[in-house]
Image (cartoon, rainbow, N blue to C red):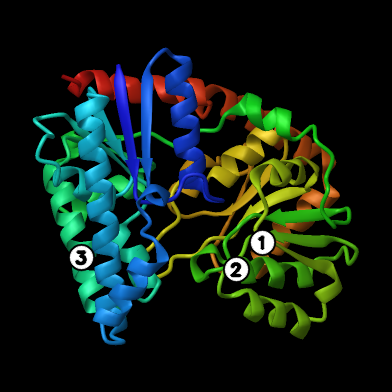
Amino acid sequence: MKVLIVTQQRIPHSGGLSTHVEILIAELKSNGHEVKLIQGGMAQPPKWEKAIRLLLALGDNNKFVSSNFKHTLNRISQLVTAEIGQFKPDVIHTHDVYASYAVQQCRNLNGIPVIQTVHGPALYEAQMGGADKLPAYKQLIMDCEALAFKSSRHFIAVDSGQAAILTNDYGLDPAKIDVVFNCVHVGEVREFIKKPIDLPVKQPYFLVPRRLVEKTGVRYAIEALAQLENKDCQLVIAGQGPLRKELEDLAASLDITPRVTFLGPVPRNSLLPLFAKAKAVIVPSVPASGVVEATSLAVTEAMAAGTVPIASGIGGLAELIAHEQTGLLVKPANATELANAMDLLLKDDTMRDQLIKNATGKVEGDYSSEAWVKKILQIYKKYAK
């Protein structure tokens, strides 16, 4: 089978969608299928074109952002049109509504089925980033969603919450949706964790591999650290984002700056060794602007790396983790409950070891990339020409 994968995002990048796509490509190829990828980095215009659009916008940021994004979508559409003619895919698998919109502009699509994986609600994510201040850009996002949801043949939701958004908010027929949780390449993770840690961290530590934005709830991990009985324990934060200064100030106000390490963005091959040596991997997500955390790669990679995931009991996180069996779930935005979970793992090695054993069995049986790709291939075969 020939599969064309399309996303408006850059591949690779330091995010879960990138890892998802990279694993998908590797697994499809290992199963004997031909794969081509079109990604957002291929559609970026030269700087002089951006400069011209900025001049034509006459300083209107709303007009400039929407014009620039339209160019990206048009370029993706051109690239897909070319690959349809040359590669002749049996199925096109998109990973965001923008890619689906661009694909639907191709005049030579000729009934090739478009399967879209929904990683999160595009409009809600954009509004969290300030899209309400850019009405033309917001309208373009809504246009992309409308066409993507109307025209795609089938949808893969990464958790039940995303499936509910598709049916409740966008009116999609549940028969057009399959829930397939994100996976992890267990063998690859276990190879990476053998590498020595080459980053400035001190034991014992808890790891928070999250972007520094509101929905990831990193502030609650910092507040929880301040409440721990063990005052030698460290918090290692791997990720970048607009809230970094605010979070650094929070650590200073709690008088724990020496115990909080901000690593900034960390490549996956350097990040995974940190997973294995951590007391736990913390995913303290909170609902923000209508966005609720979907299935988290950080959780499944923690399971594969042999450590305990602690996460907020919301969205896809609550579906991935069985509380006190394969990890610990806490109330979102509750630093005290999070601190109690962290203290428990620091004190009770027997419980921690049992959680790790259970999580290892769970990730190997249910979340491995081998089992995951079989489910996706079944969907492809159902619709492929």
191 versus 324 height, above or below: above
Residue 271 versus residue 218: which sits nearer the camera? 271
Residue 314 versus residue 60: which sits nearer the camera? 60
Quadrant of image for the N terminus: top left
- Residue 325 in sight: no
Residue 143 versus residue 280: which sits nearer the camera? 143
Q: Residues within 10 Å of mark 1 (few under 14, many from 20)?
A: many
Q: Residues within 10 Å of mark 3 (few under 14, many from 20)?
A: some
Three-letter amino acid code at the position of disc 1: Leu
Asked if the residues shown at circle 2 and circle 1 are in contact, with their CB atoms under 8 angstroms apart, the answer is: yes
- Which residue occupies 49% across, 25% down? 26
- Residue 1 in sight: yes
Q: What residue would you read off at disc 2? A: 334
Q: Is residue 133 left or right of residue 356?
A: left
| Res. 191 image quadrant | top right
Three-letter amino acid code at the position of disc 2: Asn
Asked if the residues shown at circle 3 and circle 2 are in contact, with their CB atoms under 8 angstroms apart, the answer is: no
- Which residue occupies 71% across, 77% down? 248
Looking at the image, the residue that sits furthest to the top is: 32
Q: Is residue 185 left or right of residue 260?
A: left
Q: What residue would you read off at disc 1? A: 338
- Which residue occupies 84% across, 56% down? 201
Q: Which secondary structure lies at badge 3?
A: helix
The percent position of residue 327, horizontal first and vertical second, equals: 63, 43
